[in-house]
Image: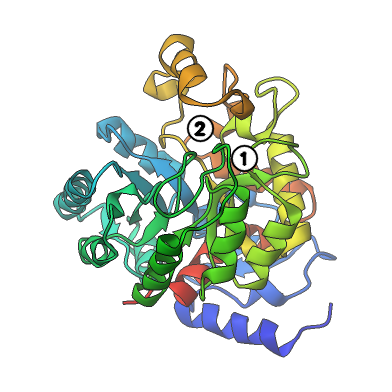
């Protein structure tokens, strides 16, 4: 495989971030069963030992639902192998958002032997070296901006580092993915995007409507995040899925798409015909369309998994039948069994390995692609 100047520039930037990693990402190692990767102690790992590879990788989750964080959450975190994750905070108003930010900043300060407040790519590198977890604080909606662009600055200075422009419904910025109309970003929304770019807040488009997604990519000067979504080509007509054109446009501007682990988003029959293999099919497709440097992973549920946090048909599934439109096609059970475990991405890495992904490409998907994106987008 021919290497370009752009490839080597990326290689050098990643090496500067994490010098203990070899320059594996741009080596063509697919013909060898004895590819090796040096960890930070200089010990070499056989490519076939996927467990050891996972233990030494930077692993980043594009969305963990952190409501009700407790001792069980920490236990799951210990089992996960995570280097860091995005956490979704209360976005109903500026007041509730500021309280959620303060609560998580307090938690990070209290458990500073285990957690790191993430403000840059370097914080994730430090978390890996110190065996801690980096937390990137943000929101799955922009309603907490209310009617003032100045509130974006307030949120930024309180610790916000990512904002999803809309949830399912319309807000002041634009239309969500289940809104009847498809109007895209408002003038206020475009102004908000510009201010987020200036501050270095990651722009997420996961729940945005089709035109809002297109506008978000087009109007953002920085690469955008689609931090928990799936491929429309594999799950037709689901409002949360992204088209090939959107995936390519996102990648062309340096963005990243995290493939969602929530089973009923991956296919209509989680636990049945929709399996872990179906999940990796979405990774395969996103890589085919957007390229290996632009695909990551994201749960969209608690780190323990849904079942472990007490989700039942009555308290989880039934309420969603009224909260979400029929087009969401909510199913029970909603999970893929292998992705319910805290170490869900070890299961993913094993399938990627079986499908012939190189060591370097597996590590990109596990977390180095997020790391590259943070380095290019976050400002400190």
The disc placed on residue 347 is: 1
The disc placed on residue 85 is: none
Picture quarter containing residue 282? top right
Is disc 1 in contact with disc 2, using a CB cutoff of under 8 Å? yes
Badge 2 element: loop
Residue 349: where, in percent of width, then height?
A: 64, 48
Query: With respect to residue 91, does 266 lie above or below?
Result: above
Residue 360: where, in percent of width, then height?
A: 66, 65
Total tally of numbered discs in the picture = 2
Badge 1 element: helix
Q: Earlier in the sequence, mark 1 or mark 2?
A: 2
Residue 65: where, in percent of width, then height?
A: 39, 39
Give the alpha-carbon distance from disc 1 to disc 2, as whole Å: 9 Å
| Quarter of the figure with the C terminus | bottom left
Does residue 229 appear to the left or right of 316 in the view shown?
right
At x 74%, y 59%, the residue is 245
Query: With respect to residue 284, does 336 lie above or below?
Result: above
- Taking depth in this image into account, of 251 and 147 the one nearest to the observer is 147
Residue 71: where, in percent of width, then height?
A: 25, 33
Crowd rating for badge 1 (residues with CA inside 10 Å; few <14, some 14–19, many 20+):
some
Picture quarter containing residue 288? bottom right
Q: What residue does disc 2 label?
A: 341
């Amino acid at each position: 495989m021919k290497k370009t100047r752009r490839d080597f520039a990326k290689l050098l930037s990643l090496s500067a971030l994490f010098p203990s990693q070899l320059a594996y990402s741009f080596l063509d190692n697919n013909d060898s069963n004895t590819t090796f990767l040096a960890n930070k102690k200089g010990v070499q790992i056989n490519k076939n030992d996927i467990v050891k590879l996972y233990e030494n990788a930077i692993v980043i989750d594009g969305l963990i639902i952190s409501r009700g964080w407790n001792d069980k959450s920490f236990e799951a975190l210990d089992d996960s192998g995570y280097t860091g994750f995005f956490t979704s905070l209360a976005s109903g108003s500026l007041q509730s958002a500021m309280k959620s930010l303060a609560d998580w900043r307090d938690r990070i300060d209290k458990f500073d032997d285990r957690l790191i407040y993430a403000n840059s790519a370097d914080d994730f590198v430090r978390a890996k070296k110190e065996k801690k977890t980096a937390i990137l604080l943000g929101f799955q909606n922009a309603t907490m901006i209310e009617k003032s662009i100045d509130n974006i600055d307030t949120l930024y200075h309180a610790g916000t580092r990512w904002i999803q422009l809309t949830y399912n419904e319309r807000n002041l910025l634009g239309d969500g993915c289940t809104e009847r109309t498809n109007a895209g970003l408002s003038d206020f929304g475009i102004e908000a995007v510009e201010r987020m770019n200036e501050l270095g807040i990651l722009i997420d488009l996961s729940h945005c409507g089709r035109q809002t997604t297109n506008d978000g990519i087009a109007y953002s000067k920085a690469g955008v995040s689609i931090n928990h979504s799936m491929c429309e080509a594999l799950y037709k007509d689901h409002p949360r899925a992204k088209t090939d054109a959107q995936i390519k446009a996102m990648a062309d501007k340096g963005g990243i798409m995290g493939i969602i682990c929530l089973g009923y988003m991956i296919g209509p029959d989680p636990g049945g015909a929709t399996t872990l293999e179906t999940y990796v099919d979405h990774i395969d497709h996103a890589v085919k369309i957007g390229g290996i440097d632009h695909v990551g992973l994201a749960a969209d549920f608690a780190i323990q998994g849904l079942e472990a946090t007490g989700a039942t048909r009555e308290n989880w599934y039934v309420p969603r039948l009224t909260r979400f439109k029929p087009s969401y096609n909510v199913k029970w059970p909603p999970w893929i069994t292998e992705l319910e475990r805290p170490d869900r991405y070890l299961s993913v890495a094993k399938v990627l390995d079986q499908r012939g992904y190189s060591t370097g490409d597996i590590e990109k998907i596990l977390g180095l692609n997020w790391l590259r994106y943070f380095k290019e987008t976050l400002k400190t």
